[in-house]
Image (spheres, grey):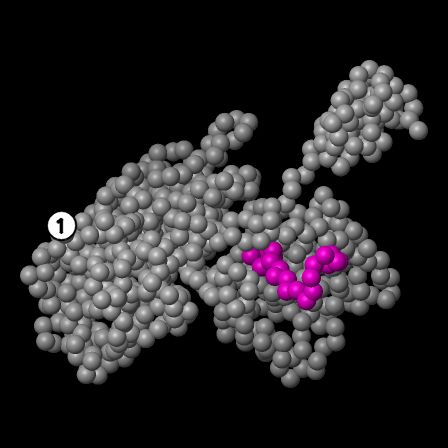
Amino acid sequence: MSARGGRGRGGRGDHAQPGGGRGRGGGRDSGSGGAARGGGGGRFDSGRGGRGGGRDGGGRDSGRGGGRGRSEPPCPAEASSNVIPCTVSPSLRFYVYGVEATSKNGKQIDSRSRRGQLYGLGVFDSKVGLLARNYDASCGKKLDDLIAEWRRLLFFQNSVIFAARPLPGMEPLAKQESVPLVGGGKGTPESDNGDAMTVTDVTQYSPPAELIPASASTAAPRKAGTLEASMASLTVDLRCADCIKSFVDDKALLAHCQMTGHAPVIASGGEGAKPANREVFLQYANVVLKRALGERLAPWGREFIDPKSFTEPQDSRSGKSLGVRVFKAFTCEFGLHKSDPDPNAPCCLGLTVDLRAKVMRTTSLLEVMSGGTHPEKKRYDDREQKDFKRQWCNEVVIATYDKRCYSVKDLLFDKSPATLPVSNKGMSHAEYFAQRKGITLKYPKAVPMVEVLGRNDSSIYLPAEIVCANELDTQLKLPLIASFTPDVRHKAIEEIRRFVTPGAQKSKGEKDLLPSLGFVLSDSRVRVRVTKLPLPVITAAGLRIPESAGGMWAPQISKANYKVDPGRAVSLNVILVYHRSLRNYMDVYNIIKRMANDFNSTYRFGERPHQLIEAGDKEQHWGAVEKYFHGRDALANAFILDLSRPPRGQSSDPAYSVVKSYLGKGGYLSQFVNYATYNHDDPRDQKKSQTILSGVARQILSKCGVRIWWVNIPKTVPLPAVFVVSKIWTCYYTT
């Protein structure tokens, strides 16, 4: 029964009644206005409620006056995935050549860079390389053009060479004889130190049988990317056998062949080729994909970006730049997929495309250190040099010109790009970057030079003006400046499809590598069925996580209280292992102790560690742990907390697996905290450090047997079921 209401405006609800005008009474649950002269209603199930009316009547579910309600959109039955099906040509062939590289003394060369140098010399040298020695002028192509074409068709993978076509001059392999590339006489080039490279064997592959339907030879031309030849029953691909081009239809292919005298690719049964297994085929497909993307985009780690396309976000209040550039980074990988959940459904090749953000500072290390002073006039006293070295040594920086990350070894305040020579090059670093990299330094006389860690513990020297910090300022909110909406991701997928579709690009130069080698992307994407599940009930020590916090419930767990009487609690004998370079290891211990003990669970940390073990790198790490435990009786209620700092330039500690295995065999529980991922010794972002360490505290209790949180699986989920859980803390520490 409703009390007298005030003025209200009738709302629209589930029914078609018009809204009421002025008068008494509350609105109905459905959200429509009263049938009589009633006040407005609120939201209940669907529709838009009117403005609330009355002190007691009206509003949502006969409660207070509600605002304009909105019905929840219906859940779609299916959705487009980010997987693009790819048709594999039945006539696709590729070749895998085994290579062996040896030093002058006959020892195997393990260095990838050195093997790459020998490969480039032996194959592409314009005078005595493999292609030059087997060049036939009657092919109608200049040698330089032929070498450029082969550079797109060959993919060096350290121990093997993938080739889209058979290499010339490899006839001896059929007789089980090796073919020298470097240092083998017979006109082959000689290396400067006697190193040699030899091709040992070759295997010709066709696609896996499961990717080629039995009806491929009679498939429709446009769907399969082939056309039927009028002679015999040969299948002709929509790609050229004499150049790296593909075509959208048979007319374009025939016109090209008539104009150039080239021939199309013809599948004649694949004599000598054996079906590749999944692993080999996917490896080949992905190296081709990487090359195709690299012809249009710039690599950044495992992703690819358009270096000319970026945004520079600004502060919403001041309008000033936040000092970063945000690039769209494309992640692409071929894999085998099933578009139908039926276990008997055939597999298909699919291209998974994702979009990530790459963020880079706009302020260089030189600008940070010079502090507004002209970089070439800035002079650093002993205190400043010491402070900058302490701040930047062992930190990770990024080179702005190639987006590679390096670990800083030292800052050379007595050297500049103009005064520091490049070893064995006869030029300064300023001249090297101008001539070899095409980068004219703005401040060639500015100090310092940045010494970074290269391969095999070598040193690389970089001008400070082309280096910036890899870690961003703590005030930057990455989700706000570096996230993409679904429509942006959709456009990114279409953009990648356009990159590798014949005729879709109007730009000149190299293109269409994927379809030219037999990989044709579909016009559609894999569709998936969608089922929306209700948010499960998440409980932590009797504390039910509210539905509003379902997307980020970890902070709520810190409020859990197990209320275990201290007299019944078990005190852990914590053995703290810390790297000798750490200064605040006891501070970190105390933070974890406080966080773990605040749960009032069965297991508690002691006021101080039971034992402290100072450790170094590698064998000095596991050796220190083994030395302590060797010959000792098993310690009750022991827990090992290891604060590890991996060696310079490494993201994970090589001693981790050794120490973990040793402790596991002894029956000891352990937890590692990785300082390479985040430096808790001198945290720039105290909140981030606290967040990580709170996760560590929960992990420790969980390993001891405390059920930190649990989920009630909705009854609508069919069982048995497999749940894939993303470990949100893995990016912070190793478990």
In the foreground, 418 or 262 = 262
Q: Secondary structure at mark 1?
A: helix
> Is 460 on the left or on the right of 50, as rendered?
left
Q: Is residue 703 above or below residue 690?
A: below
What residue sits 12% from the left and 55% below the top? 261
Corner quadrant of residue 156: bottom left
What residue sits 47% from the left and 44% below the top? 490
What residue sits 67% from the left and 75% below the top? 668
- Residue receiving disc 1: 259
Badge 1 amino acid? Met
Q: Quadrant of the C terminus?
A: bottom right
| Magenta residue span | 711-733
User: Percent x, y for residue 706?
Assistant: 75, 64
Magenta highlight on residue 720: yes
What residue sits 41% from the left and 33% below the top? 372
Q: Is residue 666 visible?
A: yes
